[in-house]
Amino acid sequence: MLLSAINSQAAALVSDIDLDPVTPKTIQYQVQGSLIKKMVLVVDNPKNYANFSLYANDELLLDNIDIPHSGQQQLTALIKLPAPGKLKLSLRANNAILNIQRLEFIDIPDQHVPQFEDISVSAGIDKVSSIKYGGPTIADIDNDGDYDFIVNNHNEESSKLYWNNGDGTVTKHSQNLARWFMHDLHGTAAGDYDNDGDLDLVVTQGGGNGTDPSKANFYTNDNGTMILTTGDVGINKGGRGRAAQWSDMDLDGDLDLMLINESSLTHEKPQHFFYENKGDGTFTQRTIADLQDQEPSRSLITDLNHDNIDDVILFGPLSVWLGNGDFTFTDITAQFPADVIALHNIMAVADLDIDNDGDQDLYLARGKEVEHGKGEAPAVDHDPITQEFSIKPRGFKGVDKFEFTAAGKIKLHNYYFLAQGEFRGKDYPFFLGSKKTSKVISAGQVLEIDPSEAQGWPDNIAENGVYFGYLGKGHWKAALVRNGDIFWNFKFSLSGVTSTTTEFIPENRNMNDILLRNDGGKFTDVSREWQIQPGGNTLGVTTGDFNNDSHQDLFLYRWGNIGARISDYILLNDGKGHFYTLTQHGANDVGGPGNGDMGQAFDFDLDGGLDLLNGSEGGEWYLYRNKKNETGNYALVRVGYSPKAHVDAIGAEVKITTAQGVYRKRVGSAGGVFSQSLLNIVHFGLGSAQTIERISIRWRNGETQYFTNKPANQLFDTDKADVKSLQLEQAQTNLRQGTKLNLSAHLTPANGDTRLQWSSSDENIIAVDQQGQITALGNNGQSATITATSPTNGVNAQSNITIEPWFAVPAKSLTLEPSPTKLLVGESLTLTATLFPAHADNSELIWSSSNIKVVRVDAAGTITALQPGTAIIKVASAKQPTVKDTIKLHVAPTIAPFIKFTNEKKLRDKVWTQNDKITLTVEYHAGSGNRVIASDEGGIRFWLRHFQSKWVPVKDRVLIDASALKTESGKSTMTFSFEDLIPSAELPAGQFYQLRASFVSSNGKMYDATIDDIKIVPSVH
């Protein structure tokens, strides 16, 4: 339908029209004024929910804005029109015939709209669909000055660590974080618990639906090698792991650990675990009364009262606790509005300063749980234009019936199910027609159904399954039957469906998000005041200033349609007490796989524009680059370790002052569900401000650092502080004609920026390069002044150099710096030789080895151990051979790690009886220079395993020899009884027994020995 054009933006574009999902309406529109406009939609919805979309010349301007309830309502959103002049606007409704009472556009000329582009493929991220678990972890894990990240997947697809290459690409870590298939991984957190300069990882995992509590996976980062050290660091209690949070709970400068768990099915307490960092590389568990037994399992660390002590927000329902800095917390939940405290389905929380008043406000994202939802009706989507119908019932006992029309065959696709309990491993068939012809397909497969295959409707639909019956004249009937609580998750789509009727009222998936303003410690619901879009089904939220206008924005992850992604919302903060809703931002994959989940905003490429790493539940990971179109100025502040106590960046506060305002941010996550980011390269949008008056950084121990009077649009680094004082070692010296000398500079503070700009008052007399090396080019008696200047603030120092006649300066001594004298075959290191005086005329050195078959040395002093033995390495002056030094090296053989049964043949060949006991003895070696660590093995672990099939165990009997811990090599013995084991001949087909011994070396690798098919016969009485 084509409506007459209405050109004036002050008048309604359309009024009092009915918008049928089957028939979009098109109007001609003359674009005038600003291309950025606020759309105001007044609509009457006859159903309990609906959606509205807007196109311009087939370009999607507004994607499926939620109309969350029945009746009249007014909605607003921000759009950007493509160009001035005439265009066609297309209005589309879904899920209801809407009465559009008024649609108008209002110019918003000063609002900058961020735009993103998908760089996932070019960056090098795996593009594979997977179940997610509450967003990624972003952190500079190797502390090289840019952000690395972990994409958290749940089971079939592993969680993965990606290293930032600094050129817009990433490299996947050599090992996945899942250690076996279907590892049931959940949230992750990165923090430097041992203060060694790189970040360690905690990867949480589930606890077998509460029946098999699991310990978190603790990885110590050894220069990029992730070594599983769960047992070594003292993580000794398992639960239904969901999240890990690093926090300095006792304010002693090191990081303690919170492990947040889902409630136990047996209601075992405590629910959450808290570990104190003892400062020696280990933790001890602490009790935190009340907090440890709170029910919610989603969490965010923040600082609500601005006391520089971490506070904890748990949510599902809200539970808020102020940290006291002594491993105690105070419950302040009552300071929140009563109706907010009563809310459930809080899926994610972000802390941000919406009004730039210096305190942390909160955004509560609310949505339907992907699983559970007992008592809810099925969720349903139908697009009559694409003829796509989708349904997602809850997995509990019940029958859901619907009818539909289709012209010809139908295609069932986008099929997914995850069984629970006793139904795991069983088929859930599709029954066709009155004969109930059974079809079984796996998740992800497609089933095409011709009407001829599904004639009629069966008399009995009591069996578990999906029933389809063709009733003639394009009319179909369907039923989903569940005779118990059999699914965690279930959904499918049907293509070719022209109309639908359900015997149930489809679930309204809309829930209102909540914006809470922090008013001096009291939290006020300002959702309506700030024009937060009503409704939605928001699974995640992240925050940042996406257009660099100095106001904090929000990115909302909408679960969307059952069968395909819709655009997520950006809420743009206008700085005047309102948010604009935007879907036209480019950080979306409309129609792509999966549903909205969670992500993080961060500056991946350090160009001053906030980028996004977004995950789609059941879909892919996406890295979106901010194109920085029409954005304001910015500053990036990298917070390293504090200069005195070397305290890490977690919890540090950064404050920037410009002529336009004061802005504060805290090092932490940009919103949270189950994972914790460490965003220590803090991003600030500065709007029109081109000059920064002051940057202050406060670490959680109270140390501070400042930058003053700086231009905007650059990265500031606390490891490159402004220089306070600068001195040259030689304030005045003579330099022999024609010779060179390296000048040394000493600056304060210790973390000052070491970059220097060197200059000479006369390059023809004394030349200087940018490394501080001077050369006497002039004549005897001539002088020049050398100046070293810090580019950070102009602080400088000078040295007056006078040329003197050349005279010989022979070498007097040569000393090898201390170094290891014992090497393993294959090891290399570079020796350092110091010549005195440093400016001796001939600095050329000659290196040699007394036994080149044992140790080789090159011209740079790099030695390589080739075979066991002894060699003497000598370094001598090339012109003065008597000036020399030597070092004696011993090379030992390298022994590769191993473990083996000492009596393997006997163990393998013997037929054992049920009343036998079997003694296993192993020899082991952790590898030269390594030791046996606990990891999650506990020492040398002995296994007697009953397998259903290869890699699918029925039951394990395990014994652990902890005495082997911290040893390099040795023997270990344990004894098993075969009592109560089923004789081998009586096992079901394919089942068998296995003996296994295993350990983990300090190199991070596991080693094992196995003997399969151990034969057990009945006892002889």
Image (cartoon, rainbow, N blue to C red):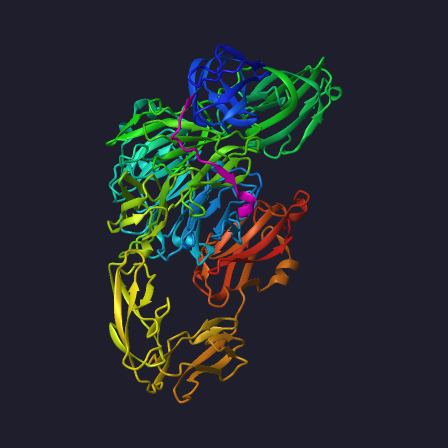
Residues shaded magenta? 106-126
From what the image shows, is residue 97 above or below residue 276? above
Taking the view exactly as shown, the residue that stands out farthest to the top is: 16
Q: How many marks?
A: 0
- Residues 173 and 722: in front is 722
Q: Is residue 376 magenta?
A: no
From what the image shows, is residue 808 above or below residue 38? below
Residue 62 % position (x, y) = 50, 25
Left or right relative to 607: residue 184: right
- Residues 552 and 435: in front is 552
Which quadrant would the N terminus be assigned to in this image? top right
Residue 365 % position (x, y) = 41, 30
- The residue sitting at 40% across, 89% down in the picture is 882
From what the image shows, is residue 42 above or below residue 601? above
Taking the view exactly as shown, the residue that stands out farthest to the right is: 452
- Residues 328 and 761: in front is 761
Residue 999 % position (x, y) = 50, 58
Residue 135 % position (x, y) = 46, 39
Quadrant of the rendered image containing residue 320: top left
Quadrant of the rendered image containing residue 468: top right
- The residue sitting at 59% across, 34% down in the picture is 424
Can I make out residue 110 in this image? yes
- Residues 890 and 983: in front is 890
Left or right relative to 812: residue 154: right
Left or right relative to 530: residue 962: right
Quadrant of the rendered image containing residue 355: top left
Can I make out residue 215 in this image? no
- The residue sitting at 33% across, 31% down in the picture is 575
